[in-house]
Amino acid sequence: MTRLAGSTVLITGAGSGIGRLVALDAARRGARIVLWDLDLERAEAVAAEIAAAGGRASAHRCDVGDPDAVAALAQRVLDEVGTVDVLVNNAGIVSGRPLVELEDRQIEATFRVNTLALYWTTKAFLPAMVAQRRGHVVTVASAAGLLGVARQTDYSASKHAAVGFDESLRVELAHSAPGVKTTVVCPYYIDTGMFEGVRTRVPWLLPILHQEKVAERIVAAVEHDRARLLMPPIVYLLPALRVLPARLFDRLMDLFGVNVSMDDFVGRRGSGVSDSADSAEATERA
């Protein structure tokens, strides 16, 4: 098990949403929290919440999609705080537009924040974890990393890459550093505002998830070294459903309303690009 009490937990996109809630929960369990967010004021506000409750936290501004910025700030954290025991790669963005309406800069930003940032942050902190023979890397992906969804050609592809990143890293570490664990998180839509406007046709089967419950389950998954956390439970069936012919699989997803779920998407503040504390165009990760 991963012990949070006395550990150092670094969270990207920590200024709001899931990042903030995971930070507060981990702090309550005795962890020292390092908050990274493009919006320094929001990160500092979360640090103040933690301090007011008797915890320890520091806040930093960082664009996780910039490898040079990540490397420089990571070295500062290592020098000032020491080894990061748990890295939570939480920052991300979504555009929510059909492919032909996506601007090139939006596609590039999606992959820069949702995919490439995983490499920059993990490469920065993994060597110290390996050296101490313990640690934990969390990748907050998405159920859209397990199937394609209409109006998510960039987002879904970036999250498929995130799932593949975690799986490859997991098996790599099993041989080279078995004390370092990984967890991939694949939730359906969460009520943080990142996917404001989305709808679910079958809420009893595919509910819009409550952010507080999601954060609690992420922290619990880390503590219990769970390799995968998929929410809601039906998401675990997706790999098995892949044996169906493509046309039948697509019809089934249509029946569940998956491919019309984004029809009324507006995102945070109604902008076309939503929710990353680590994007110049948006403000947080779900």
Image: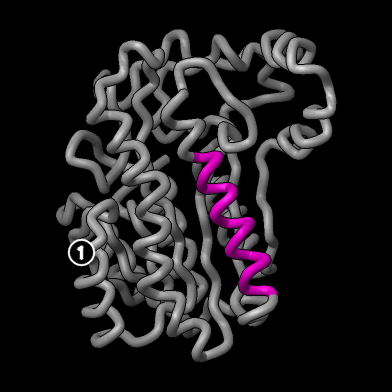
Residue hosting label 1 = 68
Please report the bounds of the magenta region as a residue range: 159-174
- Quadrant of the drawing holding the C terminus: top left
Name the one closer to the observer, 63 or 192. 63
Specify whether residue 90 is painted magenta: no
- Residue pictured at 81% horizontal, 28% vertical: 241
Specify whether residue 173 is painted magenta: yes
Relative to 249, does residue 210 appear above or below in the rendering? below
Name the one closer to the observer, 207 or 284. 284
Number of numbered callouts drawn: 1
- Residue pictured at 40% horizontal, 44% vertical: 114
On the image, the x and y values in percent for residue 147 come to 63, 29
On the image, the x and y values in percent for residue 13 come to 33, 52
Which residue ends up furthest to the bottom in the rendered image? 132
- Residue pictured at 28% horizontal, 51% vertical: 65
The local crowd at label 1, few if under 14, some if 14 to 19, many if 20 or more residues have their Cα within 10 Å, is: few
Image-based side of 98 in relation to 106, left or right: right
- Quadrant of the drawing holding the N terminus: bottom right
Image-based side of 10 in relation to 63, left or right: right
Which SS type dominates the magenta stretch?
A: helix
Q: Residue 53 occupies which quadrant of the picture?
A: bottom left
- Residue pictured at 78% horizontal, 29% vertical: 242
Kind of residue indicated by mark 1 = Asp
Relative to 261, does residue 194 appear above or below in the rendering? below
Relative to 147, does residue 169 appear above or below in the rendering? below
At mark 1, the secondary structure is helix
